[in-house]
Image (tube, rainbow, N blue to C red):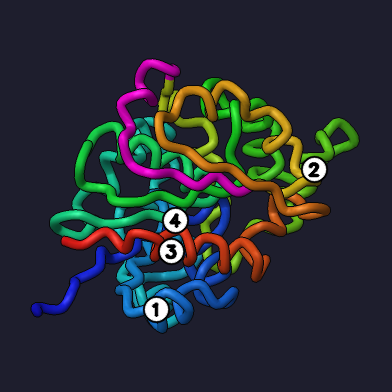
Amino acid sequence: MPPVLHNPVVLLHGCGGSMQATFAETGWIDAITASGRAAVALHLPGHGVTARMNAPQAEAATGVSPTSLAAHDPSTYSDLAGTLTSNLPSGSFDVVGFSLGAKIALELAVRFPGRIGRMVLGGIGDNVFAPERIAEAAARALESSPSAETPPPVLDFLRVWEPHRNDALAVAAVLRRPPNPVFTPDRLRGVTSPVLIVNGGADPVGRMAETLLRSLPNVTSMTLPDVGHFDLPQQAAFRRHALEFLQAQGAAS
């Protein structure tokens, strides 16, 4: 009997983060590899190389050759999912996405029906149907510094974003991008992949997810008590539930 070839798992981090901190340093890549899968961790557009370094320094520090993705023009990021398309595995694949990475994963599922086997999405709720409400305040804080008027969620973001791996002005441009991905319940009803949504009980995003859950035809959701938005990727329980879900019917290619 020929061996079953499992889909590779594409990993998409959140805004201001990195594949290293979100998935490598938290054990995700090791766990996926140990399960017999290939882990394909991608940097989101505008992430991964700091413009403050010159080209040789950036490549030596990150292992990634500098690219045009660190542009400071918001229009560069008018199609985040489309920009990532050329980096996706050929054929079918599974996806784990966190926050903005989860939104992009949903957009990929809409665009490529049948190519995504199973999806695990964290830090996402009904916010997928509206622009990021703190985006402009976060962009201003990245460009200068927080002020007395900076909202608490932006201060939380500033505590965890990764300036040593990202360019502040590029991330600000991502936050100011033309709205995308843009979802409606009707668009999401075309997503046939099995989806697991995991949120932290202390994350306001997860408390409002009814419309999202009603819109996806094949969805399971769970909440991890006392876990905040930015704490989610490092939770062993999140990783364990995700791997169990991905392996449940280990989509064969």
Q: Quadrant of residue 192?
A: top left
User: Distance between the Cα atoms at labels 1 and 3?
Assistant: 30 Å
Residue at image location 72% in from the left, 51% down from the top? 158
Which quadrant of the figure has residue 126? Answer: top right
Amino acid tagged 4: Val
From this viewpoint, which residue is outermost toward the front?
1
x and y percentages locating residue 127 in the rendered image:
59, 28
Q: Residue at x 47, y 69 (%)?
A: 53
**Disc 2 designates what residue?**
146
Q: Secondary structure at mark 2?
A: loop
Distance between the Cα atoms at labels 2 and 4? 31 Å
List the residue tagged with mark 4. 96
Residue range (magenta): 184-198
**Marked residue nearer the N-terminal end (1 or 3):** 1
Q: Is residue 178 visible?
A: no
* Residue indicated by mark 3: 49
Q: Is residue 219 visible?
A: yes
